[in-house]
Image (spheres, rainbow, N blue to C red):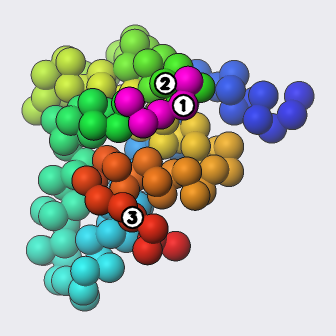
Amino acid sequence: MVVSEKVKNLSPLGLAFVGDAVFELMVREMVMSRGNLPVNKAAPEAKRYSMAASQAAMFHRVYESLTEDEKDVIRRGRNAKSDTRAKNASVSDYRHATGLEALFGYLYLMGERERLREVFGVCVGRENKDMD
């Protein structure tokens, strides 16, 4: 099986597992690119982007700019049944956030780094081409 076929066959929750880490790293990189912030200021700033409610809003912001394959991945992630529950988020926000994370995991594992940066830029509300 070709690597891309393996990625396409991963469970949406598996993709979200990877995507959560990818998204968090991109957020931290973005926050730190603004200057050498002390951790006690950088961490809350990064958390603003990583909260389920924020990621759910990003899901809706980015959805129309996605390809059909990407829309399929993000929907599969949103619709995946998870045994975990959000602590401080609605079920709807948590599911949309999972969809977004699945998309990030998919793009990362497919090696689509440029597309990943484009999608991240839409998510955070700016063109983000300066993130290498």
Q: Is residue 33 above or below residue 96?
A: below
Q: Considering the numbered disc 1 on the image, is that residue within a helix, a strand or a loop? A: loop
Quarter of the rendering occupied by the N terminus:
top right
Q: Residue at x 68, y 43 (%)?
A: 110
123 on left or right of 52? right
How far apart marks 2 and 3 lie (CA) works out to 21 Å
Residue corresponding to mark 3: 128
Instruction: Give the residue type at disc 3.
Output: Asn
Residue at the spot 42% in from the left edge and 36% down from the top edge:
65
Q: Is 27 or 128 nearer to us in this picture?
A: 128
Q: Amino acid at mark 1?
A: Thr
Q: Is residue 89 left or right of residue 29?
A: left
The dot on residue 67 is 1
Q: Which residues are magenta?
A: 64-68
Question: Percent position (x, y) of residue 127?
Answer: 36, 61
Q: Nearer the viewer, residue 20 or 104?
A: 104
Task: Please identify the dominant SS of the magenta region.
Answer: helix
Label 3 CA crowd tier, 10 Å (few <14, some 14–19, many 20+): some
Residue 90, horizontal then vertical, whole percent: 13, 22
41 shown above or below 77: below
Q: Residue at label 2? A: 71
Residues tagged 2 and 3 counted as in contact (Cβ below 8 A)? no
Q: Which amino acid, mark 2?
A: Lys
Residue 84 colored in magenta in the image: no
Residue lying at the far right of the rendered structure? 1
Q: Residue at x 37, y 56 (%)?
A: 121
User: Marks 1 and 3, Cα distance to the nearest angstrom?
Assistant: 19 Å
User: Label 2, label 1: how many angstroms apart (C-alpha)?
Assistant: 6 Å
Which mark sits nearer the N-terminus, 1 or 3?
1
Please, what secondary structure does the residue beneath circle 2 have? helix
Outermost residue to the bottom: 36
126 w.r.t. 6: above or below: below
